[in-house]
Image (cartoon, helix red, strand yellow):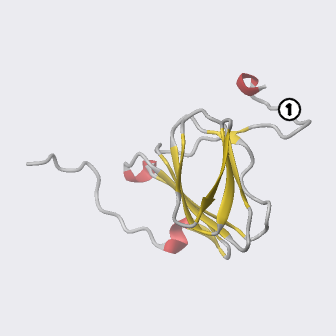
Amino acid sequence: MPKESRIEPVHIAKAQWMKKQDPPKGVLEGHPYGTNVVVIRYSVDEIGEGPNLHVHPYDEIFHILEGSAEFTVGKNKFIANAGDLVIGPANIPHAYKNIGPGRLDSFDVHLNSEWIQYDLPREGENLSSKEFS
């Protein structure tokens, strides 16, 4: 017989984790529920917009729900379209931008109980953390 789970079933209503409805955006960290996952819903209508270059100390999986994105993961650049999955390994800088036409909508799964992110500097910016400057 499989070992019984240590967590309880939980229903989390949309209003409890979605912060913006149009375009949809929301974050849910798993630690309050005993799970080792963070889920993020990120959507953007503007072409060229998306998360800037950053890094996490854990792996991340992106699911493109709608639209197309240009991803940079380490030294790799590629296009991901609706239905595609992208894996971002831990400690590898990554970013993605909406390349249109229309909305980019993604569901991102962080394999950690809390969201930890280190933003990397844009040209001319300095970081406060010495390990990345």
**Which image quadrant for residue 125?**
top right
Tell me: residue 126, above or below residue 37: above
Q: Nearer the viewer, residue 2 or 10?
A: 2
Secondary element at image label 1: loop
* Residue furthest out toward the right: 124
Q: Position of residue 34 (x, y in %)?
A: 37, 48
Q: Quadrant of the C terminus?
A: top right
Q: Position of residue 46 (x, y in %)?
A: 79, 68
Q: Position of residue 37 (x, y in %)?
A: 45, 49
Residue drawn at (38%, 68%) of the image? 11
Q: Position of residue 94 (x, y in %)?
A: 66, 42
Left or right of 12? Residue 22 is right
Q: Amino acid at mark 1?
A: Asn
Residue to which mark 1 is pinned: 126
Q: Nearer the viewer, residue 88 or 12?
A: 88
The answer to whether any part of residue 55 appears in the image is yes
Residue drawn at (45%, 51%) of the image? 30
**Which image quadrant for residue 128?**
top right
**Which image quadrant for residue 15?**
bottom right
The answer to whether any part of residue 27 appears in the image is no
Tell me: residue 23, above or below residue 1: below
Tell me: residue 118, above or below residue 35: above
Please rate how many residues cluster around mark 1, counting C-alpha atoms within 10 Å: few if below 14, some from 14 to 19, many from 20: few
* Residue furthest out toward the left: 1
Residue drawn at (25%, 48%) of the image? 6
Residue drawn at (59%, 32%) of the image? 91
Q: Nearer the viewer, residue 87 or 22?
A: 87
